[in-house]
Amino acid sequence: MSKYQKITGYQGIKKDLSNGRYLAIKYINGKEFSKKFSNLKDAVNWRAIFHPSIPERVIDNKLQESLVNFVQTKTGAKLNS
């Protein structure tokens, strides 16, 4: 039995059955890149944003910005920064 389960509707995202984390996999020029996340939304965003030429801190900032925008749209409130 496989350790990972494919998530239907999300290409390149698998769920780890032992701990519930999500594994995002992206291939660029035949090379595999992957990262684990605690929630599906972060895994999907990482696959959309990630490129090896972009520094990891820039990608993390983009993921954080998308989370803030998501919270703002759900609550209708602006967060102080």
Image (tube, rainbow, N blue to C red):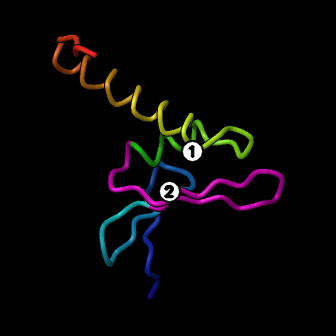
Q: Secondary structure at mark 1?
A: helix
Q: Main secondary structure of the magenta part?
A: strand
Asked if residue 6 lies left or right of residue 49, the reply is left
Q: Residues within 10 Å of mark 1 (few under 14, many from 20)?
A: some
Quarter where residue 21 is shown: bottom left
- Please count the marks in the image: 2
Q: Position of residue 36 (x, y in %)?
A: 46, 60
In this rendered view, identify the residue nearer to me: 33 or 10.
33
Percent of width and height locating residue 81: 28, 16
Amino acid at pointer 1: Arg
Q: Quadrant of the N terminus?
A: bottom left
Which comes sooner in the sequence, label 1 or label 2? 2
Q: Nearer the viewer, mark 1 or mark 2?
A: 1
Q: Residue at x 26, y 17 (%)?
A: 73
The residue under the point 40% across, 55% down is 37
Which residue is denoted by mark 1 in the rendering? 47
Per the rendered image, the range of residues in magenta is: 23-41
Using the image, determine if residue 42 lies above or below residue 33.
Answer: above
Position of residue 57 in the picture relative to residue 67 (left or right):
right
- Residue reaching furthest to the bottom: 1
Of 53 and 15, which appears nearest the observer? 53
Q: Are marks 1 and 2 in contact (CB under 8 Å)?
A: yes
Residue 35: x and y in percent read: 52, 58
The residue shown at (22%, 14%) is: 80
Q: Label 2 belongs to which residue?
A: 13
Position above or below: 32 against 68: below
Helix, strand or loop for disc 2: strand
| Image position, residue 32 (x, y; %) | 70, 61
